[in-house]
Structure formats: C-alpha cells, structure tokens
Image (cartoon, helix red, strand yellow):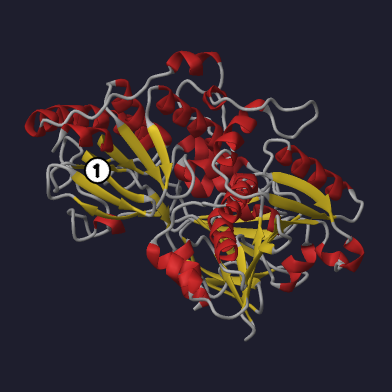
C-alpha cells in the first residue's frame, strides 16, 4: 500500500456505540490508535432508555443517556471519531479489512463488533397482533399511554423488576408475571418491586394470551405451580397494558455465516475476545456472558481494547501501515463540554438553544446548500408560542433559514400548530412537524432540514433508487413520543423520502399533543407509522430503517 493511502486507513473500526464500544474506543484512542465508532441509531445503546442508573460505580445516580453521553465525550476527547451510518457488510479476509456502510467503505486493520442486543418477543398468543396496541417493549417510550390503567409486566430479570417500578409512575397497578419461582436479578432490585404497594408479583406464572378488539382488553395467564388458568380484564372494560422484558436477542446478523455463533446467536470469542475470524473482536451484549450490565460492558470493552492494541501493533509491523494518530483534546474537554470546541454563534438570552447545542447545529448548518423557509401554522396557544421560539432560535443560527407565518385560518384546526419546511422558491419539501420538535425529535428535525436543503446524508444506492421509483402520491404520518429513542429512525427515513421525491409527504406528530390521532389509531406504542398511498391506510408500529419503510410502501 502506498504512503499516500495511509490517511484513509483506521487502526480499528468499532461497530456499535453503546458502553462496550465507547469504552473500547476511549482506550484505543488514548493508546494513540486511530479508531472510528460507527453507530446506526444513537450513541449510547440500550441503556439510554433507562431513566435512572444507580449501580454504576462512582456515579451515585444518572440517566442512561447522561452516563453514555459522558462516555462518548471522553472517547472523542482522546481523538476517537464518530459516524452515524448503517454497516451493511464486512470483508475480513485480507490484512486490511473493509467495512461497507451506508456512507461509504471504511478500511481498517481490525474490527470490534459491539452491536448489543434488542428485546426478544415472549411468544404468547396475540403478541404480534397487538404490538403497538397494548403490547410494548419500552417503558420509557410507552408507559405514559397507560396512565391510570392496569399493566402486566412479563419477565423475571433486572429489566422486568426495574421497569415495573418505573411503570407505577403511570399505571394504577402493575402485575409482574415471573416464569420461575423468583426473580433472577440482584436482590436489591427485586426487593424494590416486592416492596412497591402498586406492584403484585406472581411467580411461576406464564402469560398465555392477550385478547381484545383494536387494543388489548384482557390477558390470560397460567399458574405453573397449580395448573390453574387465570383471566383478567379491567373493571371498566378499558385497555390493559402488557410490557415484555424477557431478555434480548443479540444483533449478530452482520457476522452470521462469517464468525462462529452459539445456538442462541451470541458471538463465541476466545480469551482475547477475538472471534473465529482473525482481526474481528467482539464485546458487550453480542457475546456469551453471565451478567449483562453497564459495568460488565465497560469492563469488557476496556479488556478487549487492550487485546486489540497487541493485535494492532503486530498488524502494523506486518503490513507496514501506520494510520495517523488521533488528535487528543482532553484539555478542552476538561475545561468545557466537547461540543463547544466547535466555533459557533453564541445563543441569545432566553433562547431554547444554548451554546453547546449551537455548536452542534453549526456543524450541520455549515454543510447545507440551499435556503429553506420554516413556515409556521399557529393557533395562538402556548404550544404555538413555544414552536415559534424554537424556530426563531434555529433560524438565528444560519442565513439559510428564515421564519414566516402562514394564514392558519385555512388550516384544519385539529392539525395546529405545525411547522412546514418550504424551499426558497415556495415549493413544499413535504416535511412538517405538528407540535414542537423537542426531545429526541429535535435532532431528527435538524437532519430533515439538512436532507431537504442538500446535500443530505449519504444513503445506499438501492434506497435512493427505491425513493425515486415511487410514482404515486404517498402520505406518511409518524406519531412519536419526544422521549422515545426508537422514533427518530422512522422520522428521519420518512423525511428523507419526502425530501427526495415530491410525491411523498412526511408529517410528524407529537402524539401527546394530538390525542385524537392516538385514539383514531389506538396508539399505545410509538413510533406509529401510517401509510396512505390512495388505496387505504396501513398502520405499522416499531423501529424501522429506510429500506424497511420503502418495502412497506412498495
């Protein structure tokens, strides 16, 4: 390999931005190896949906999002690079590995798989039919939908016990169905569930079925000790919530048929955390392990990085390739948040955008190409005032955005307030947000602006062609919760389709601001995607990427 190609090679690519991946990146960058973390959705992993972490050593209490955001900043401080993209395939046979992503190919000397795991289905009758209509898998995302209602939790591990306690914030009562004769998690976590007056724990219990019409209205479960079946429905005949926490399925499809997996799909590694493929390491919840906690993921990430250092030293000597060293800026991070290291306009007093956020916005807005108009449709209420404040603050960050107010008298009052994104020549971009794009939707809204302005985020050629091939009007409506970590993927994908094809519209709704839509589609889980191509509405729940939504549109 010629000398002038060295700048294009990383020592290591870490696939997955959860605690294991971020820790490994921190250790590798600190050891002066050039490392890139590729994350598909959001940095932080599954722990970001946990509202309170109290068992991480050295941290009395923090949300999962706060904890992992600090990890990310630490890794960046030592020079680790971050990329939001989907890894599509791996070429691992040669000394220089190739990671094929939705944003291009990346070459490196070693790869760390730290893709984590996703919630498993429990397999009871009606689980798939009522997904999003009473069956849910994320208490943080969907708990509010069951305010004042009876809720069942299926599972006996840490997540089931902890999330059941969290659900008592909303539910009138929570019943936990534990399949074995007791919880399998730490005693302190189980004791908190047992002690909560709003929780009933049923051990040796198996959920058999959920029943209802458009939503779950009853559950049927088995007492495995006595063989007796029990049925439950609420006294008023209203909806019943069922939250499933029965473990996780490892995200190992990327290496299926490449590396050795166990019967459950977990990656098998040796005592160096290397898989059966030379140069491919694995850490975190994709691996066989007895305890799945942030602390164990962090420890495994650190240990794996140390082993990778030895491998990379030998790989450098073997190939003669010396990737450039990362640029450490730990002093900057120690003095101020990492994001403020980017020059950006200061926020104005009273603005919802602080200096750190302004810096992050500038990194996106500086790459935008064409001007856009944020056209406000307001009804004079408090939410309208908040929406105007957000849009004025955004427009203050770049000359490519300006705010104007539309004549809302011609709008359907049930749709107000909302902001539509319009191109400078007055043509609609197809993007609109109903309510205020706060929480996790702030980032997706900004990405929508970037995609509408151009050049936009890189996407796979097949997806680009799929968008171009849509030849009939398609309306996409996405009902989201601002605290939902799974919603932005769907929102960004739908907005990209609208930005690239004038026949597609993408309207996003904060479901808590528009209860009539929640009732119309019996929404008890987000994200909820409503597709209308003129042949009738189709409703789909759950996290999806661009390719999956294109397949649904057909």
Q: Residue at x 15, y 27 (%)?
A: 313
Regarding residue 150, the answer to whether it shows in the image is yes
Residue 179 located left or right of residue 9? right
Regarding residue 125, the answer to whether it shows in the image is no
Vertical placement of 222 versus 149: above or below? below
Crowdedness near tag 1: few (<14), some (14–19) or many (≥20) residues, C-alpha within 10 Å: some
Q: Residue at x 48, y 76 (%)?
A: 469
Q: Nearer the viewer, residue 454 or 62?
A: 454
- Element type at marker 1? strand
- The outermost residue toward the left is 318
- The outermost residue toward the bottom is 535
Vertical placement of 147 versus 439: above or below? below
Q: On the rendered image, what quadrant is the N terminus found in?
A: top left
In x, y percent, where is residue 357? 63, 32
Res 83 → quadrant: top left
Q: Residue at x 32, y 21 (%)?
A: 30
The residue at which mark 1 appears reads as 107
Q: Residue at x 67, y 38 (%)?
A: 398
């Amino acid at each position: 390999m010629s000398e002038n190609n060295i700048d294009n090679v990383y020592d290591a690519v870490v696939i997955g931005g959860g605690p294991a991946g971020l820790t490994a990146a921190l250790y590798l960058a600190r050891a002066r190896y050039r490392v890139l973390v590729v994350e598909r959705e959001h940095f932080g992993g599954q722990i970001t949906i946990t509202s309170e972490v109290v068992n991480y050593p050295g941290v009395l209490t923090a949300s999962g999002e706060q904890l992992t955001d600090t990890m990310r900043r630490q890794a960046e401080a030592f020079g680790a690079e971050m990329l939001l993209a989907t890894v599509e395939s791996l070429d691992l046979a040669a000394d220089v590995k190739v990671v094929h992503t939705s944003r291009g190919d990346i070459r490196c000397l070693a790869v760390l798989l730290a893709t984590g795991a996703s919630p498993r289905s429990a397999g009871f009758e009606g689980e798939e039919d009522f997904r999003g209509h009473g069956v849910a898998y994320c208490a943080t995302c969907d708990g509010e939908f069951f305010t004042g209602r009876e809720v069942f939790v299926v599972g006996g591990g840490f997540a089931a016990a902890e999330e059941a306690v969290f659900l008592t914030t909303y539910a009138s009562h929570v019943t936990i169905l534990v399949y074995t004769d007791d919880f399998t998690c730490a005693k302190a976590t189980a004791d908190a569930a047992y002690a909560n007056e709003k929780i009933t724990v049923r051990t040796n219990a198996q959920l058999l079925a959920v029943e209802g019409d458009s939503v779950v209205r009853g559950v049927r479960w088995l007492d495995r000790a006595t063989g007796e079946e029990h049925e439950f429905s609420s006294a008023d005949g209203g909806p019943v919530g069922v939250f499933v926490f029965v473990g996780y399925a490892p995200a190992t499809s990327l290496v299926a048929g490449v590396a050795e997996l166990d019967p459950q799909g977990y990656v098998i590694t040796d005592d160096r955390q290397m898989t059966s493929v030379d140069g491919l390491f694995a850490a975190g919840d994709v691996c066989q392990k007895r305890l799945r906690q942030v602390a164990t993921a962090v420890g495994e990430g650190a240990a794996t990085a140390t082993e990778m250092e030895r491998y990379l030293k030998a790989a450098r000597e073997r190939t003669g390739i010396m990737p450039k060293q990362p640029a450490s800026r730990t002093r900057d991070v120690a003095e101020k948040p990492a994001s403020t290291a980017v020059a950006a306009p200061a926020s104005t007093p009273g603005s919802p955008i602080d200096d750190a956020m302004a810096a992050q916005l500038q990194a996106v807005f500086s790459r935008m190409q064409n001007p856009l108009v944020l056209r406000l449709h307001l009804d004079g209420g408090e939410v309208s005032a908040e929406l105007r404040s957000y849009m004025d603050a955004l427009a203050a960050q770049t000359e490519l955005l300006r705010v104007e107010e539309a004549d809302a008298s011609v709008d359907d009052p049930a749709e107000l307030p909302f902001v539509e994104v319009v191109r400078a020549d007055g043509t609609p971009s197809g993007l609109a947000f109903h309510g205020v794009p706060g929480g996790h939707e702030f980032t997706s809204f900004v990405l929508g602006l970037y995609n509408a302005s151009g050049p936009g985020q890189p996407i796979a050629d097949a997806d680009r062609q799929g968008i171009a091939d849509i030849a009939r009007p398609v309306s996409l409506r996405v009902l989201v919760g601002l605290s939902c970590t799974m919603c932005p993927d769907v929102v960004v994908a739908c907005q990209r389709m609208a930005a690239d094809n004038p026949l597609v519209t993408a309207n996003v709704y904060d479901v808590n601001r528009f209860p009539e839509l929640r009732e119309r589609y019996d929404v008890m889980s987000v994200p909820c995607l409503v597709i209308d191509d003129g042949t009738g509405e189709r409703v789909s729940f759950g996290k999806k990427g661009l390719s999956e939504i294109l397949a649904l549109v057909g």
